[in-house]
Image (tube, rainbow, N blue to C red):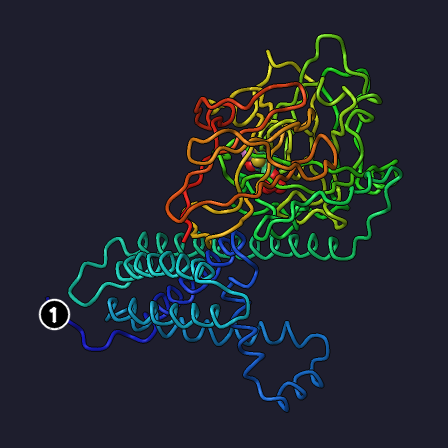
Amino acid sequence: MTRRPQASPARGWPFAVSGAIAAAVLFGVAEISSVLFSPVSSPLVAVGAAFIDVTPAWLKDVAIDAFGTADKPVLVVSMAVVALAVAAALGLVARRRLALACVLCAVLALLLGAAVLSRPGTTWGDALPTAAGAVVGIAVLRWLVGLAHRMAPRAGEATAGSGSARRAFLFAAGLTTAAAVVAAAGGRALTAAGRAAVASREALRLPGARRAAAALPAGVGADVPGMPPFITPNAQFYRIDTALAVPKIDPSDWELRVHGMVEEEFTVGFAELLDLDLQECWVTLTCVSNPVGGDLAGNAKWLGYPVRELLRRARPLAGADMVLSTSADGFTASTPLEALTDGRDALLAVGMNGEPLPLEHGFPVRMVVPGLYGYVSATKWVVELEVTRFADRAAYWTERGWSERGLIKLASRIDVPRSAATVPAGATVLGGTAWAQGIGIDRVQVQVDDGAWQDATLAAEATVDTWRQWSLAWEGAPGNHTARVRAVSRTGEVQTSGRAAPAPDGATGWHEVRFRVE
Ligand SMILES: Nc1nc2c(c(=O)[nH]1)N[C@H]1C(S)=C(S)[C@@H](COP(=O)(O)O)O[C@H]1N2
Ligand SMILES: [Mo]
């Protein structure tokens, strides 16, 4: 095959275009996947920010003078022009040295990734959108360059069919450009919506409760160093959900639809909800996946509107026995109608420990139902309550083999000492937590090294819906020891020693820790 040393310059444009499109695809893919990470993971944002950081002050002043509030769009457009020029040059390189162009592309992606990681508050994961963009961008470059070659055959190659090759190239170029633009615009729009949610949360001042939570009695926390706090701070509260990206809902867009087997269907907006008689209560949430001794439990003061009041307005029809709550991202939970109407503090919650719900705990509105595991009751980002029957509908985890009802089981754990800890010889204090939501804890007993069961000292009880801390003074000889704990509820139920795995309806068994006295 003969090679023509110089192709005519007119034939270079498809390669330059291929390079520019590949760059657009890189940024588009990175933009849409950055929605899954923090907004700072967008290479567009990172490069813009880095650019602003390195721009000398005098140039910034010139730009602001010249363009005023349009300085940011001007920045974006000039960055885009530079990026497209670089990308077009890469495309021209790819014409003859495709492998080299791909390597250069990867190097540029590395620089973009470095720009992202140089932003404050980023972690390694924030480089993933850029990496994903680079992989797709390079693939698109190779594909378009292949099509461009077919369109511009070299000397000696048949020219027949180049018309259809041209159409194929233009079609592919148009398609990828459209995909890149849609991905980038979609990514920007979703991020902007997220920012609106964050801003509204920050600006939100929740009204006070019409009915305040009972004041905590003195001594709800066992006086044992190393115990978890009685009130779990929001930032430490366990988080369990199926949401890859936390739904970011602007409260002004939020609406709850109450429907199904009811006499009156209706919807409630956020402002309307805040105008109702809100009440506050202490409730300990627990996850069905919590293993014996585990920490998938947290205790908070929730502010919200009683679900029973909403149901009273809807008037459920005879035969209904379940409320299927649905979140904005499609998760569902099946709560027995009875648990929502029997007078317990089942809330449509808007506040957690005196603040609006954190985004990852369900902002702007979630359910909280004392006595039921989260998977059948605590729907975050809730947007729908459907009154129905267990016989007719199944919830998210029920369809995946978990029990359709999930009553929180009587449980206790040892928090101090931790397993495998070393305790100094002499008098020490063991401490832990027990719960029997809706019933209350009457007794906690501890057995050390197969000795007699001893009654622990119970800390004060806040409400029957909250956990209860306990402590036990103890002194043991140097060496290895094992302590186990069991709780007795107010109805006299003794926590079973029978071991059950979390699936399908919650773990059972006594929590045991082995530790060493030295
Ligand atoms: N939308 C939504 N709500 C959800 C879940 C979920 O996956 N999606 N998980 C539930 C489960 S299994 C539990 S244990 C609780 C946990 O609530 P938290 O993350 O606020 O602690 O939320 C419940 N609500
Ligand atoms: Mo859970």
- Say above or below: 211 vs 96: above
**Few, some or many C-alpha atoms within 10 Å of disc 1 (few <14, some 14-19, many ≥20)?**
few
| Residue 329 at least partly seen | no
Residue 309, quarter of the rendered image: top right
Left-right relation of 394 to 347: left
Q: Which residue is at a point 21% across and 66% down the rendered structure image?
A: 154
Q: How many marks?
A: 1
- Say above or below: 331 vs 7: above
Mark 1: secondary structure: loop
Rendered location of residue 404, percent (x, y): 56, 19
Rendered location of residue 465, percent (x, y): 70, 31
| Residue 337 at least partly seen | yes
Rendered location of residue 27, percent (x, y): 47, 62
Q: Which residue is at a point 40% across and 66% down the rendered structure image?
A: 17
Q: Which quarter of the image is occupied by the N terminus?
A: bottom left
Give the image quadrant in which the ligand numbered 2 is located.
Answer: top right
As rendered, which of 257 and 446 lies closer to the eye?
446
* Mark 1 lies on residue: 2
Left-right relation of 399 to 67: left
Outermost residue on the top side: it is: 319
Say whether mark 1 is within 8 Å of ligand 1: no
Rendered location of residue 185, percent (x, y): 57, 56
Q: Which quarter of the image is occupied by the C terminus?
A: bottom left
Residue 163, quarter of the rendered image: bottom left
Outermost residue on the bottom side: it is: 58
As rendered, which of 75 and 58 lies closer to the eye?
58
Identity, as a three-letter code, of the amino acid under mark 1: Thr
